[in-house]
Image (cartoon, rainbow, N blue to C red):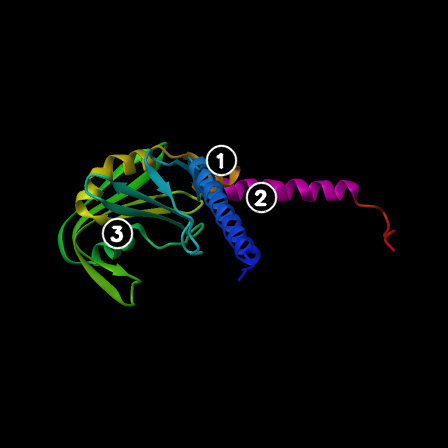
């Protein structure tokens, strides 16, 4: 009895082709991920620390997301950035207290500040049982957790960054996190920043422009209306 092996060989060839195509796509995706060395959030540009990973986020609430895996401990931390725009996101103190409230119990916490390039940075370091999940929704208590959060004030809107995970990993990643936060540079300096810092100057500039426009209109005003 003879068997027709052509359909089987054809199917096998198709599977190999599909697998090769998927591997190529994964390879291309990995290469693209490796190319990302910096990113912008709000008015700042940040450099991704060495050995940290860029994570594509599908959440419109998150401006950027990173992760770091401690190879010795075989555990990771997640870092999320938020930016809501000028005047949005709430007060600094309220946000720091809200982050602290995500621990129950809270074993220890510390708030401290830094100033870089004229921008005030507020830090919160916390340790305890972290309630992982959506605030107001279902949460999962995780013992021995750590959090290092940073709020960078800026006229165009504060930038919020929060690193969470096992306390031991958060501790080892603290220096890299702070270096990233404090090494930020303005991503797009603009006149709007100066206006936001000095509202009175902004009002004066606006008034001067209106006066100039009014004078210009009077000089060019025709003696009769010639419009259609």
- In front: label 1 or label 2: 1
Residue that numbered label 3 is attached to: 96
Residue 155 located left or right of residue 73: right
Q: Is residue 214 rendered magenta in the image?
A: yes
Is 128 within the magenta?
no
- Label 1 sits on residue: 189
**Residue drawn at x 30%, y 48% as measured from the top left:** 78
Q: How far apart in space, not on screen, are marks 3 and 2 (Cα)?
A: 39 Å
Q: Is residue 44 visible?
A: no
- Along the line of sight, which residue is nearer the eye, 138 or 205? 138
Q: Image point 46% across, 38% down: which residue?
A: 31
Badge 2 marks a residue whose secondary structure is helix
User: Chief secondary structure of the magenta span?
Assistant: helix
Q: Can residue 23 be seen in this view?
A: yes
Q: Which of the two residues, 154 or 64, is positioned nearer the viewer here? A: 64
Graded by Cα atoms within 10 Å as few (under 14), some (14 to 19) or many (20 or more), the crowding at tag 1 reads few
Residue in the picture at 30% in, 40% down: 121
Q: Taking 122 as reference, is 136 above or below it?
A: below
**In this picture, which residue range is highlighted in magenta?**
201-220
Query: From mark 3 to mark 1, how far is it between C-alphas?
Result: 27 Å
Sequence order check, earlier mark of 3 and 1: 3
Mark 2, Cα crowd under 10 Å, few <14 / some 14-19 / many 20+, is few
Secondary structure of residue under mark 3? helix
Q: Nearer the viewer, mark 3 or mark 2?
A: 3
**Are dots 1 and 2 in contact, CB under 8 Å?**
no
User: Height in image: 176 above or below 159?
Assistant: above
Q: Residue 58 carries which label?
A: none
Pointer 2: what residue? 207
Which residue is rendered at x = 39% and y = 47% of the image?
55
């Amino acid at each position: 009895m003879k068997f027709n092996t052509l359909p089987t060989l054809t199917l096998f060839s198709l599977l190999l082709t599909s697998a090769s195509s998927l591997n190529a796509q994964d390879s291309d995706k990995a290469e693209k991920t490796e190319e990302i060395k910096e990113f912008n959030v709000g008015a700042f540009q940040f450099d991704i620390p060495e050995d940290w990973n860029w994570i594509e986020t599908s959440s419109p609430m998150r401006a950027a997301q990173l992760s770091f895996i401690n190879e010795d401990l075989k555990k990771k931390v997640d870092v999320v950035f938020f930016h809501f725009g000028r005047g949005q996101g709430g007060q600094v103190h309220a946000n720091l207290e809200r982050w602290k409230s995500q621990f129950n119990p809270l074993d220890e916490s510390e708030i401290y500040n830094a100033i870089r390039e004229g921008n005030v940075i507020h830090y919160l370091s916390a340790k305890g049982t972290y309630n992982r999940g959506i605030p107001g929704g279902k949460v999962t208590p995780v013992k021995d957790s750590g959090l290092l959060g940073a709020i960078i004030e800026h006229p165009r809107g504060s930038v919020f960054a929060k690193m969470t995970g096992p306390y031991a990993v958060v501790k080892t990643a603290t220096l890299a996190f702070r270096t990233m936060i404090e090494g930020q540079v303005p991503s797009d300096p603009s006149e709007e920043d100066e206006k936001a810092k000095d509202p009175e100057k902004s009002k004066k500039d606006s008034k001067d422009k209106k006066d100039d426009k009014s004078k210009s209109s009077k000089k060019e005003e025709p003696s009769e209306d010639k419009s259609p």
